[in-house]
Structures are given as C-alpha cells and as structure tokens.
Amino acid sequence: MSCPHLSGVAALLKSTHPTWSPSAIKSAIMTTANTLNLANVPILDERLLPADIFAIGAGHVNPSRANDPGLIYDTPVKDYLPYLCGLNYTNQQVGSIVKHKVDCNKLKHIPEAQLNYPSFSIKFGESSQTYTRTVTSVREAKSSYTV
C-alpha cells in the first residue's frame, strides 16, 4: 500500500507547491521521513530489531513535514543526461525520455553517485571518495544553515 499513499502525498505536495519538480517532491518526502515511532524510539523491523535502511528506506512518510522541508535536493532533467548516456542508452532512447534531441558523444558521462540525490552509499576501502550535493532552500523567509 505504499505506492498509493506516496502517490497521494506527492499529489498533495504538487498542489501546494506547483513549481516543484518531481525530484524536489521526492527529496521533500525522503528527507522529512521519520525513522522513530510516536514513542520516539527506532521503528522496528519484522524481527523486532531497529529497522535498517534496507527495511525502512528513508523512513515513515510525514506529509506535514514534507510540505515544509526547508531544504531540498533538486535534480533538473538536464542533470540526468550525462548519467543516462553513461548507461549506454542511445541518443534516440535518451531523447525520447527528455523529449528533445541529445548527443551523448558531447556529454561527459557521470556515475549515479554524482546525481544530486538525497541519499547515497559509500563503499569503504582504501581510496577516498568525495560526494557533492547542492541543496535549495524552499522557505519564504531568509534562512541560515550550518553544516
């Protein structure tokens, strides 16, 4: 039943924020989800253990928080072009997705990790890895954040 519930939340967010992109809506839902239950303890999995990321995903959807997330990770369609081309889709296939002509030979291909996505995974090893994310404030008032 998660699909109809999330579809409903996405529709509510789109009606409240008509200028938000699909990735902005997804980001708002993911980054405001709860991993704690109403008793403020971790949500449990089927073994009655604290649920890990594979069991719970981003967490339990919180529609009211998603409506005012503060910051979002927005990924415009154009940002997906180098990624899709890197997956060896043809110009025609990528063009049919984005609804305009594409020349993958002119784009520097990127891995999935370089998309401005609200989550990522890191494989620990001897080499260092750098992930860069860009957030956008969706608050009306001026805001300041410290990382």
Image: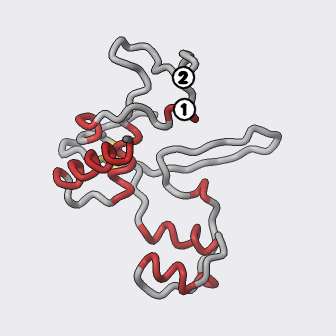
The mark found on residue 130 in the picture is none
Mark 1: give few (<14), some (14-19) or many (20+) Cα within 10 Å: few
CA–CA distance in space, label 1 to label 2: 9 Å
Three-letter code, disc 2 = Glu
Residue 104: give x, y in percent of width and height.
60, 82
Three-letter code, disc 1 = Ala
Residue 47: give x, y in percent of width and height.
58, 18
Query: Mark 1 or mark 2: which is in front?
Result: 2
Residue at (40, 82) in percent of width and height: 99
Q: Mark 2 points at which residue?
A: 46
Comparing 147 with 103, the one in front is 103
Horizontally, is 30 left or right of 121 in the view? left
Comparing 8 with 100, the one in front is 8
* 75 over 91 or under it: above or below: above
Q: Is tag 1's residue or tag 2's residue first in the polypeptide sequence?
A: 2
Mark 2: give few (<14), some (14-19) or many (20+) Cα within 10 Å: few
* 108 over 34 or under it: above or below: below
Residue 108: give x, y in percent of width and height.
63, 74
The mark found on residue 55 in the picture is 1
Residue at (48, 82) in percent of width and height: 95
- Looking at the image, how many numbered discs can be counted on the residues? 2
Residue at (34, 44) in percent of width and height: 28
Horizontally, is 112 left or right of 123 in the view? left
Q: Are marks 1 and 2 in contact (CB under 8 Å)?
A: yes
